[in-house]
Image (spheres, rainbow, N blue to C red):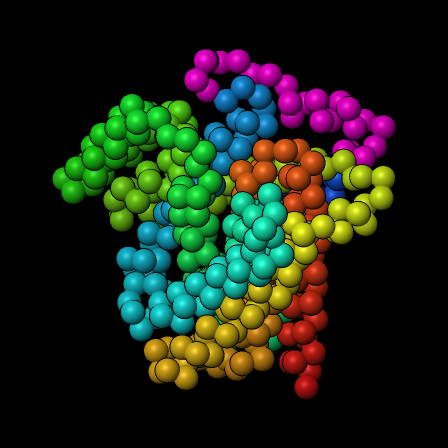
Amino acid sequence: MIRKFLSPIYQFLYDSRAVGSILILCTIVSLILANSPWQQAYLSFWDTSVHIGEHLPHSILHWINDGLMVPFFFLVGMEIKRELTTGELSSIKKSMLPVLAAIGGMACPAVIFLIFNINTPYSHGWGIPMATDIAFSLGVLSLLGKRIPLTLKIFLTALAIIDDLGAILTIAVFYTASLHTGYLLIGAGIMLLLIVLNLCKVQKLVFYLIPGAILWYCIYNSGIHATIAGVLLASCIPLPRLPMLISRLHDPVNFFIMPVFALSNTAIIFPPDILNAFNNTISYGILAGLVIGKPLGIFGFSYIATRLKLAALPAHTNWSQLLGVGIIAGIGFTMSIFISTLAYPEPALQITAKIAVIAASLLSGLTGYFYLVSKKQQ
């Protein structure tokens, strides 16, 4: 009886739709609380001071964004490494289409954002519409069930992983305010140690995780965003250990860390006239970048790649389905919101950017879903 009762719960937790559903729920709850009579208490909670040390995050929100998100980036880094070594991106033939599509899907939204903001103080936000949220996009695609071929889901997964890599590089290179050489040199020494451990085929994870914690501390104080430490550590983990680590981190990251991130980073107070939040170049750039730029870049670069015979469409798919995937890839949520907090220090600009990201992600998800449903029925 207990097994029968728990079986649907376990099935739900391992369904790719679950992560997206939970993130949507957390976002709705956070928005409601941030605009309710409990607004002050809710916002104050995330800003509660946590003084553990002089050179460590100093509030709950900072601990979430600079500390708790490190395992998320660690998991993403391991997934990138696995795909590049043994997965869909392990050969030129397999990887060419998703790589080129991802490049187009990052470049076009960034260019579109800059078209709206090139001569404004807001141009630094060009990285916001570049990202694709793996959990949400795959969740929407999975709602279509067997109507969508498995090869198309694999294509979207590979594209989103390359997209994440692009976002990580963007954060490291373009969203670093100032550098502290001393911490960088110590961090470089730790990385060298981790590389040597990997080359010596050391398998015990404790020899990676302890230096990894020191690496995080150095990266945090170096001026580079602390979450990059998770990706750097992931690149040094021995290949045989990746499947076990990815499996163990899957649930904590997707069903705890990401929901907590959504709760804390979507605590947005809606302005009295919320429509004004869409009446500025930041919102224009994000909305147009994610809703139009993403499918335009993914479809356009894929079409050019196939015409030049650099790549071929995934088996059992057509151009209509690829366009639908491009539209769904406009769901930027997690990484786009994360980059919003880095691009704009001013809370008012962060709120504007986050509202635009949520609206664009919702529009992209709904449009992509109903477009693919209509194409299947034709």
Above or below residue 237? Residue 129 is below
Specify start and end residues of the magenta stretch as a single range.
32-56
Residue that extends furthest to the front in the rendered view of this protein: 119
Q: Say whether residue 39 is magenta.
A: yes
Residue 263 rendering spot, x and y as whole percentages: 66, 36
Above or below residue 309? Residue 142 is above
Residue at left 63%, top 33%?
346
Residue at left 17%, top 37%?
196
In the displayed structure image, the side of residue 88 where residue 34 appears, left or right: right
Q: As rendered, which of 245 and 275 lies closer to the eye?
A: 275
Residue 278 rendering spot, x and y as whole percentages: 75, 51
In the displayed structure image, the side of residue 46 where residue 313 appears, left or right: left
Q: Quadrant of the C terminus?
A: bottom right
Q: Is residue 224 visible?
A: yes
Residue at left 37%, top 77%?
311
Residue at left 45%, top 13%?
54
Q: As rendered, which of 357 and 25 lies closer to the eye?
A: 357
Q: As rendered, which of 269 and 349 lies closer to the eye?
A: 349
Residue that extends furthest to the bottom in the rendered view of this protein: 378
Asked where in the image residue 370 lies, by quadrant, the reply is bottom right
Asked where in the image residue 74 lies, by quadrant, the reply is top left
Residue 61 rendering spot, x and y as whole percentages: 59, 28
Asked where in the image residue 324 lies, by quadrant, the reply is bottom right
Above or below residue 105? Residue 77 is above
Residue 160 rendering spot, x and y as whole percentages: 48, 58
Q: Is residue 141 visible?
A: no
Q: Say whether residue 140 is magenta.
A: no
